[in-house]
Structure formats: structure tokens, C-alpha cells
């Protein structure tokens, strides 16, 4: 019974607060139930948005030649895929009959979500047959089977559950290593929709080592569409209220350098988000492994780790910056001041500036009047490296290094030393005009 139908007959008997309670749409629901409902609604909205983005590519351009369909198929209604003739073809052992049936199923089930007869397919128990056809000798049948299953998992949570319960998720993960581009991309989309449906489904995918498979695609694929699908799927593996397993931490410790590099890149994107995302990485205890890579990985991996740490520092609050410092980020950041790549030197300089700026806030609030992070930079021989960078022919690096020393390490110099420093800085400033960029 709706609230509108209830209130008029009882309005006089209810207090204003009771009337408001009766009108409240969540009345009678616990906080756990409301959270589950929000998660379900969020997953549905995410799926709908993604399906809208990819529907034309997925449903139209797979077989643009209209002759690929049987003449009878082109005239059939949405529910005629379930007639006896087509179902006989579907369960036949004849590959050509299977191809004919699966073409029609793909055409109907991958249609607009308002018309696709997904409920009927699930109710008839056809999910198991679609799964079995993933091992068909026909590439066409395998592609259509992945598309149909992908369309089912893009539906309601009940639809997704029916596919997950079929045990097909390990097969989807295996197909990410297929030589067939279309099988890979359609499997990516299916996994992405499964992962965003529920944290338990996400964790199932992660337990099957799906992340290394996706990273291999990102490393090797030259197709923008496949790369977009891989990134979208990877982002869904990072979603959910319950914290995901520490897959990034594991890969940073035991993975190959190429995988470590991609994990650092992924973490960099996460850490470039809001403070809640930064805190998620901290809570997952990934920072120690990330900083270890920053200190000891190969140069390409250290660069990606530097971007990640820089993002955490630039967007983090005081407590988050303190955590990054406590985990030992200052020393490897200072070490990167001596590399020959100006862009990375700038990232490291900006990261150190963020740390020292937060240290100034501590200094201003404390009784000691000391920036606690200055001593750590000095211990890492950072000041020496900053002074060296004031000889850099790169103007941006020169200015940033000069500003850091001026703002945090100038101190209360004796008058003679201050005068000498001013003269030296004046000469350095004049010489900037002779630098070639």
C-alpha cells in the first residue's frame, strides 16, 4: 500500500513527526538493508551507463553484413528465438545449426534492454547451454556465446547471479588470453559487469588472477576500444563497499617489472582521485610496497611509482601526508632529484614541496616551532641535491629547487651569510637568461 493511500484516513490521528515517518520511503528498513539497496541501485546505474556507451559497438558492428542472418531470423519476433525449431538448433551437435541458433540469440538478447528477452532465457535454463558453447570448435559460436552471456550479466542482479552460479567466470578469465580480439574484449565487458554487481563477485574475479590478465592486455593491445574496456573493467575491480583483496600489494611484491609498472600506473589513477580514494589505498596497506618500488624498481617502474606518490601527497590531507612520510617516501623522492629526466625531477620536487608545506603547518601549530620534515630531507641529502639543481639549465627545475630552499631551509642566517646568499642568488638569476631550453 502506498503512503499516499494511507495518510488521508489517518492524518488526524498521527502527530506531525509520525506523519513524516509514514511518508519516509525507507521506513521499516535497517541501515544494512538500505546500504544493500543503494549498492544494488548504484551497480544498476553503472551498468546502464556502460551499456549505453557500448551498445552500438557491441550489437551492430559485430556482423555488419546483413546476410549473416538467416532470412527467417530477420523477420522473427523477439520471442521466436525460443520456439522449438531454434531450440533444437541450439542443443544440436551440428556446428552449423549451433551457429544459426546463436546468431539469433545474440541478435535478440543483445538488443535494446527494454526489449531483450533476458528473463525468458534465464527462466528456461539456457545459461548452462550458452556456457557449454564457449568450448565450441566454431569461433563464431564462441563469440556469440560470450556476447549473449555478457548481455545477461549486464541485466539485473538476479541475471548476473545466474551466470556466476554457472561457474563460467574462470572461463571468462581464460578467454582474456585468447588470440581472438573479439573474444578478449567481450570477455572483458562480461567480467566488468560481473565485478560491479557485488563485492563477492568482484572478489571472485580477483581470486582468479584476473588483474595480471588485464594488465597484459593493456601492455600489448593496440586497439583503443579494447584498452578502454580493460581500463573500465579494472576500475570496477576497485569498486565496492567491502575492501577488495590486496591484489595490488601482491603484484607489487611478486610481479614482473612490467606488471609492477602497470600496477603503479593504476594506483596513480586511483590516488589522483579524492581523499577517500587515497585513504582506501592506505587502508589496504599498499603504500609500503609502492614506496619499496619507488626506491628499488627499474627506472620506468620508479617513474610510475613517483607519479602515484606525488598524487597521494598533492591530494592528501595532513594525516595522509604524514602516513606517506612515515612509510619512508622522502629518501627515494630525494634520490630521484638526480635523474636525467626533467619531468620526473619536477614530480619529485612537487612531492617534496607538498611534504614540507604540510610540515610548515605543523611548525606553526606546535610549541617547538620546528618543521619536522626538514630534518628528514636533510638526512636524505636532499638539500645538497636541491642546491645542485639550482645549476640546472631547466628554468622550471631551477625555480622550484630555489623556492624550496628559500621557503624551508633558509632559516635565520647571520647577516653576512644572508648578504652573500642574496648576491649569489642575484648572480644565478642573471645567468638564467643564458640557459638554453
Image (cartoon, rainbow, N blue to C red):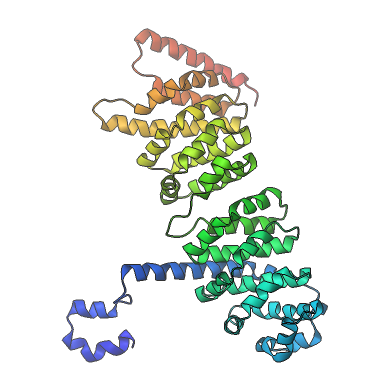
At x 72% / y 59%, what residue is drawn? 178
Position of 87 compared to 166: left or right?
Answer: right
Query: Looking at the picture, does residue 423 appear above or below residue 88?
Result: above
Percent position (x, y) of residue 149? 63, 72
Q: Quadrant of residue 416?
A: top left
Residue 74 image offset from top left, x and y in percent: 76, 85
Residue farthest along the top direction in this orientation: 416
- In terms of depth relative to the viewer, which is nearer, 378 or 8? 378
Q: Nearer the viewer, residue 84 or 15?
A: 84
Residue 111 visible in image: no
In the rendered image, the quadrant that contains the C terminus is top right
Residue 141 location, quadrant: bottom right
- The answer to whether residue 165 is visible is yes
Q: From what the image shows, is residue 107 above or below residue 403?
A: below
Asked if residue 170 is positioned above or below residue 20 in the image, the reply reads above
* Position of residue 242 measured from the top left corner of the image (x, y, whole percent): 42, 58
Q: In the visual, does 110 lie left or right of 73?
A: left
- When the figure is inspected, residue 309 is found, relative to residue 242, above or below; the finding is above
Q: Residue at x 66, y 50 (%)?
A: 216
Question: In which quadrant will I find the N terminus?
Answer: bottom left
- In the figure, is residue 103 to the left or right of 365? right
Foreground pick, 236 / 403: 236
Where does the image place residue 291, in percent across and percent down from the top left?
49, 36
Query: Residue at 75% of width from left, 58% of height from top?
Result: 179
Q: Report the label total.
A: 0
Q: Is residue 319 left or right of residue 202?
A: left
Amino acid at each position: 500500500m502506498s503512503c499516499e493511500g494511507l495518510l488521508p484516513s489517518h492524518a488526524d490521528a498521527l502527530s506531525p513527526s509520525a506523519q513524516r515517518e509514514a511518508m519516509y520511503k525507507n521506513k521499516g528498513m535497517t541501515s544494512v538493508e538500505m546500504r544493500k539497496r543503494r549498492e544494488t541501485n548504484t551497480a544498476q546505474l553503472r551498468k546502464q551507463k556502460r551499456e549505453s556507451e557500448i551498445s552500438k559497438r557491441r550489437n551492430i558492428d559485430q556482423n555488419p553484413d546483413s546476410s549473416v542472418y538467416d532470412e527467417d531470423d530477420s523477420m522473427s519476433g523477439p520471442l521466436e528465438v525460443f520456439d522449438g525449431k531454434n531450440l533444437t538448433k541450439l542443443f544440436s551437435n551440428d556446428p552449423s545449426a549451433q551457429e544459426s541458433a546463436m546468431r539469433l540469440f545474440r541478435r535478440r538478447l543483445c538488443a535494446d534492454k527494454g526489449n531483450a528477452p533476458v528473463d525468458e532465457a534465464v527462466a528456461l535454463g539456457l545459461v548452462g547451454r550458452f556456457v557449454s558453447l564457449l568450448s565450441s570448435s566454431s569461433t563464431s559460436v564462441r563469440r556469440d556465446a560470450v556476447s549473449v552471456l555478457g548481455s545477461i550479466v549486464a541485466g539485473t542482479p538476479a541475471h548476473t547471479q545466474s551466470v556466476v552460479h554457472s561457474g563460467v567466470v574462470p572461463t571468462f578469465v581464460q578467454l582474456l588470453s585468447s588470440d581472438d580480439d573479439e573474444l578478449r574484449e567481450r570477455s572483458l565487458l562480461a567480467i566488468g559487469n560481473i565485478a560491479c554487481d557485488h563485492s563477492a563477485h568482484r572478489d571472485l574475479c580477483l581470486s582468479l588472477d584476473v588483474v595480471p590478465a588485464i594488465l597484459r592486455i593493456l601492455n600489448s593491445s593496440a586497439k583503443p576500444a579494447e584498452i578502454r574496456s580493460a581500463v573500465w573493467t579494472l576500475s570496477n575491480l576497485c569498486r565496492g563497499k567491502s575492501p577488495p583483496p590486496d591484489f595490488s600489494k601482491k603484484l607489487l611484491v611478486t610481479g614482473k617489472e612490467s606488471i609492477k609498472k602497470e600496477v603503479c600506473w593504476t594506483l596513480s589513477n586511483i590516488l589522483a582521485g579524492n581523499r577517500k580514494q587515497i585513504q582506501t589505498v592506505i587502508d589496504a596497506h599498499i603504500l609500503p610496497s609502492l614506496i619499496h618500488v619507488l626506491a628499488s624498481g627499474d627506472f620506468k617502474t620508479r617513474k610510475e611509482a613517483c607519479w602515484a606518490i606525488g598524487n597521494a601527497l598533492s591530494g592528501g590531507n595532513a594525516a595522509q601526508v604524514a602516513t606517506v612520510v612515515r612509510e619512508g617516501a622522502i629518501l627515494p623522492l630525494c634520490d630521484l632529484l638526480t635523474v636525467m629526466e626533467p619531468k620526473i625531477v619536477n614530480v619529485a620536487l612537487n612531492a617534496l614541496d607538498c611534504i614540507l608545506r604540510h610540515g610548515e603547518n605543523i611548525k606553526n601549530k606546535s610549541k617547538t616551532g620546528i618543521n619536522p620534515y626538514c630534518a628528514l630531507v636533510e638526512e636524505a641529502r636532499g638539500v645538497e641535491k636541491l642546491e645542485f639543481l639550482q645549476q640546472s639549465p631547466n628554468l622550471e627545475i631551477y625555480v622550484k629547487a630555489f623556492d624550496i630552499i628559500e621557503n624551508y631551509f633558509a632559516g635565520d642566517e647571520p647577516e653576512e651569510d644572508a648578504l652573500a646568499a642574496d648576491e649569489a642568488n642575484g648572480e644565478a638569476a642573471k645567468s638564467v637568461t643564458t640557459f638554453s631550453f
